[in-house]
Image (cartoon, rainbow, N blue to C red):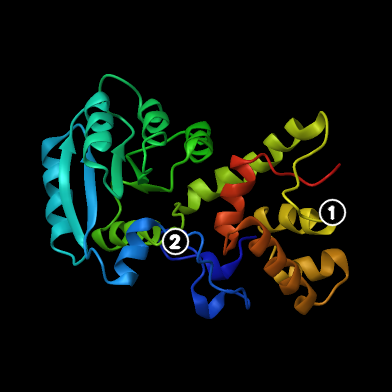
């Protein structure tokens, strides 16, 4: 089952402060764009739109610029162009079509994450395979939005990513959770990576990303929900994250798994 506090009607968003189970707000995860906004410096998120279709790019530009806090500084219709623009203009945010001509969106993503400073990247797609979802977040994507999403959901996803957090659809999150179990055996050789987590915290992590609620965790380990919350607080602080979704992405990206 999925933890209810991280679900929205049309997508998955990080838990809000009122439902974070007592976990302090994670300042480290905030993006440069968000920090500037909070610091009263630059008021607009500088954005590059990369999509093969001119009409779709036009619609995104109109949508973003009708909202406060966004400025579209460039558009691209193919892969090499968006990488060049990103290196030249140094945007805060790149909206990347996975079906760009010339090279795959994942190939472009590989180049974008090496840019300095690295932008926040939201992938746009009409359909995506399970393996692509997992690979995209391993490579460094921050969000995945279906092109059929409503304007409200699209803007919610973009603002979530700008805050330094992640965004996934319900279906994509299911792929991510399943992938954790597929990736776990890769740590079988040598010492497993634990990132400072204790064996109990690793075990809790494995159950959390599999969808266990706090109540489920309490039953699983015969501990109180208060103790579960304390474990989660420790895990989030050690990994520099703030919610279950970020924990799932971190676990995949770093091949994190509980000792067998």
Quarter of the N terminus within the rendering? bottom right
Rendered image quadrant of residue 242: bottom right
The percent coordinates of residue 186 (x first, y second) are 73, 31
Residue visible at 64% across and 56% down in the picture: 239
Say which mark, if any, is on residue 30. Answer: 2
Residue under the image location 34 percent in, 71 percent down:
38
- Where residue 229 sits, quadrant-wise, is bottom right
| Residue 163 occupies quadrant | bottom left
How packed mark 1 is, by other alpha carbons closer than 10 Å (few <14, some 14-19, many 20 or more), is few
Classify residue 257 as left or right of residue 22: right
Expressed as whole percent of the image width and height from the top left, the position of residue 98 reads 34, 33
Badge 1 marks a residue whose secondary structure is: helix
Residue that numbered label 1 is attached to: 199
Circle 2 crowding by C-alpha within 10 Å: few under 14, some 14–19, many from 20: some
Q: Is residue 123 above or below residue 149?
A: above
Q: Would you place residue 42 above or below residue 20 in this image?
A: above
Q: Dots 1 and 2: beta carbons under 8 Å? A: no
First in residue order: circle 1 vs circle 2? 2
Disc 1 or disc 2, which is closer to the eye?
A: 2
């Amino acid at each position: 089952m999925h933890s209810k506090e991280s679900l929205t009607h049309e997508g998955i968003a990080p838990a809000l402060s009122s439902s974070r189970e007592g976990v302090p707000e994670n300042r480290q995860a905030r993006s440069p764009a968000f920090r500037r906004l909070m610091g009263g410096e630059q008021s607009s998120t500088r954005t590059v739109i990369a999509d093969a279709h001119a009409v779709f790019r036009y619609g995104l530009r109109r949508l973003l610029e009708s909202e406060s806090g966004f400025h579209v500084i460039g558009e691209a219709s193919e892969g090499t162009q968006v990488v060049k623009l990103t290196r030249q203009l140094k945007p805060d945010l790149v909206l990347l079509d996975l079906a760009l001509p010339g090279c795959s969106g994942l190939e472009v993503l590989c180049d974008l994450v090496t840019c300095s400073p690295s932008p926040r990247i939201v992938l746009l797609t009409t359909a995506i395979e399970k393996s692509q979802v997992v690979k995209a977040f391993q490579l460094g994507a921050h969000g995945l939005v279906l092109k059929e999403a409503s304007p409200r959901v699209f803007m919610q996803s973009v603002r979530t990513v700008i805050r330094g957090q992640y965004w996934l659809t319900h279906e994509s999150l299911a792929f991510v959770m399943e992938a954790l179990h597929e990736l776990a055996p890769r740590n079988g050789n040598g010492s497993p990576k634990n990132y400072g987590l204790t064996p109990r915290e690793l075990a809790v992590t494995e159950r959390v990303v599999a969808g266990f609620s706090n109540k489920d965790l309490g039953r699983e380990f015969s501990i109180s929900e208060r103790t579960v919350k304390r474990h989660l607080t420790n895990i989030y602080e050690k990994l520099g994250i703030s919610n279950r979704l970020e924990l799932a992405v971190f676990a995949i990206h770093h091949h994190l798994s509980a000792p067998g």
